[in-house]
Amino acid sequence: VIWAACNLVDFVQLAQYRSHTDDMLAALQHALGDFHHLKDVFIDLGCHDHFNILKLHSLIHYTDTIQMLGALDELNMEISECLHIDYAKKAYSATS
């Protein structure tokens, strides 16, 4: 469990760098590969039923995307999520 989690954390940390070398991209792929190899331990322990999770699947495309577009530090959903929260609160308060 710890090794699976550590590999996922390593992947997340490496993906957030502002620039990537070929060695870093290889480490990124290695960490994700190790996580996928070890993730079944969560199913075996009954922590999770499956790993058919879209956000988890999208991680396999990170290395290719970084190679095509550069660092992904500017690509996030934070702004749109904040706007969604604001508009959802306004709509809720208008109907209550």
Image: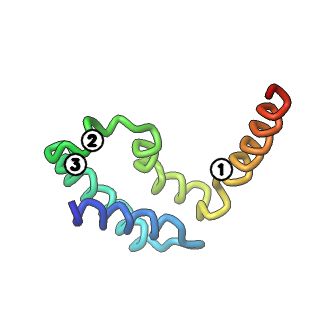
Identify the amino acid type marked 3: Phe
Assign the N terminus to one quadrant of the image.
bottom left
User: Can you give x and y, in whole percent of width and height, for residue 63 in the image?
Assistant: 46, 56
Location of residue 2 (image quadrant): bottom left
Which of disc 1 and disc 3 is earlier in sequence? 3
- Residue under pointer 2: 48
Please, what is the three-letter code of the amino acid marked with disc 1?
A: Met
Q: What is the three-letter code of the residue carrying label 2?
A: His
Q: Say which quadrant the C terminus sits in.
A: top right
* Residue 70, image quadrant: bottom right
**Residue 38, percent across and down?**
20, 54
Q: Which residue is mark 3?
A: 42
Viewer-nearest residue: 63 or 39:
39
Taking the spot 19% from the left edge, 46% from the top edge, the residue there is 40
Instruction: Locate residue 25: give its quadrant.
Output: bottom left
* Mark whose residue sits in front, 3 or 1: 3
- Report the Cα–Cα distance between label 2 and label 1: 26 Å
Q: Residues within 10 Å of mark 1 (few under 14, many from 20)?
A: few
Q: Are marks 3 and 2 in contact (CB under 8 Å)?
A: yes
Callout count: 3
Residue 12 location in percent, x, y?
Answer: 45, 63
Pointers 2 and 1 in contact (C-beta within 8 Å)? no
**Which mark is first along the chain, 1 or 2?**
2
Neighbours of disc 2 within 10 Å: few (<14), some (14-19), many (20+):
few
Q: Which numbered tag is attached to residue 77?
A: 1
On residue 10, the disc is: none
Q: Residue furthest front?
A: 96
